[in-house]
Image (cartoon, grey):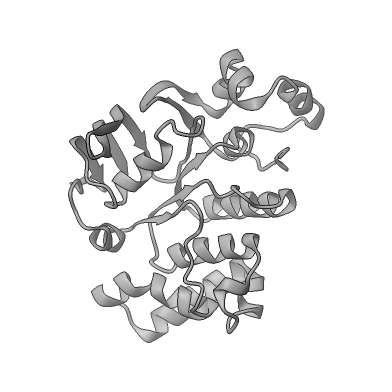
Amino acid sequence: MLRILNLEAGYGPLRVLKGISIHVSPGEVVAIIGSNGAGKTTLLKTIAGILQPQAGSIVFDQAEIRGLATEKIVARGCSLVPEGRHVFNSLTVRENLLVGAYARRRRKGSAPDFAQSLENVYRLFGVLRERSHQLAGTLSGGQQQMLAIGRALMSRPRLLMMDEPSLGVAPLVVRDLYATVERLRRDGMTLLLVEQNARAALAAADRGYVVETGQIVLEGTSRELRDNPEVQRAYLGREYRRIDEEDNHEPGQPVQPQV
């Protein structure tokens, strides 16, 4: 579904991505982990068209999307849940969700189609239904993250990219968010997760990549990365193996992250 080859991007003269190549197959959950400043967010922004690549190829659904405007990429079925949520504080929950459906409605949407999309989001996040007329800026951080995910889902994406969904969110809410990731996976959604919370991401993912200083330094299945001593040392913490064995989790199953 998504294939990136030798991607380079950055900010002005600063080159952040240095020849990154990854792929995501239909129905997969793929995690990209790495430390702060490694280039993870830059990668998602470049895929989404927020940043223009300096070199390389971005192929989505067998079509080159490098250089396309963000709204055209969304219309093709690739949506981003940005780091920091970026909800529209002065709009209600429902109005924020309506904004998320804009690209699709312009293309071929209809009122009944929008109503069904809205109902799907409300089923996924019941609290958004309860607060549909509340201003987004008055929601808690976890509720705003749910709204950001729901807004992206309103475009009916085939690939959903999530940038640091657990950032600044309480541990119990993180658990619920990753339960939502698992539910989306069961429904056939393809997901690309960027996380500093490597434990949560690898528990949810099929495969993963490790990014350091703008380059892919390691890739493998979730189990392979979880068992890798360097990944454990750098991203999972020395207590990871003991906790994992005590909990007896299988790869790809949601866990309650230790944050």
Left or right: 18, with 100 as reference point: left
Task: Examine the image and state in which quarter residue 219 appears.
Answer: top left
Q: Is residue 42 above or below residue 50?
A: above
How many marks can you see? Answer: 0
Q: Where is residue 185 shown, x and y percent of the image?
A: 53, 50
Q: Compared to 24, does 80 lie above or below? A: below
Residue 173 image point, x, y percent: 69, 55
Residue 108 seen anywhere in this rendered image of the structure: no
Q: Does residue 186 appear to the left or right of 219 in the view shown?
A: right
* Residue at 57% over, 51% down: 181
* Residue 207 point in image, percent of width and height: 49, 31
Q: Quadrant of residue 224?
A: top right
Q: Which residue is depicted at the point 26% across and 36% down?
A: 9
Would residue 136 be visible to someone looking at this image? Answer: yes
Going by the image, does 68 lie left or right of 104? left
Given residues 83 and 128, the one toward you in this image is 83
Of residue 10 and residue 80, the one placed in the foreground of this image is 10
Q: Residue at x 51, y 54 (%)?
A: 84
Q: Quadrant of the N terminus?
A: top left
Q: Residue furthest right?
A: 246
Quadrant containing the C terminus in the rendered view: top right
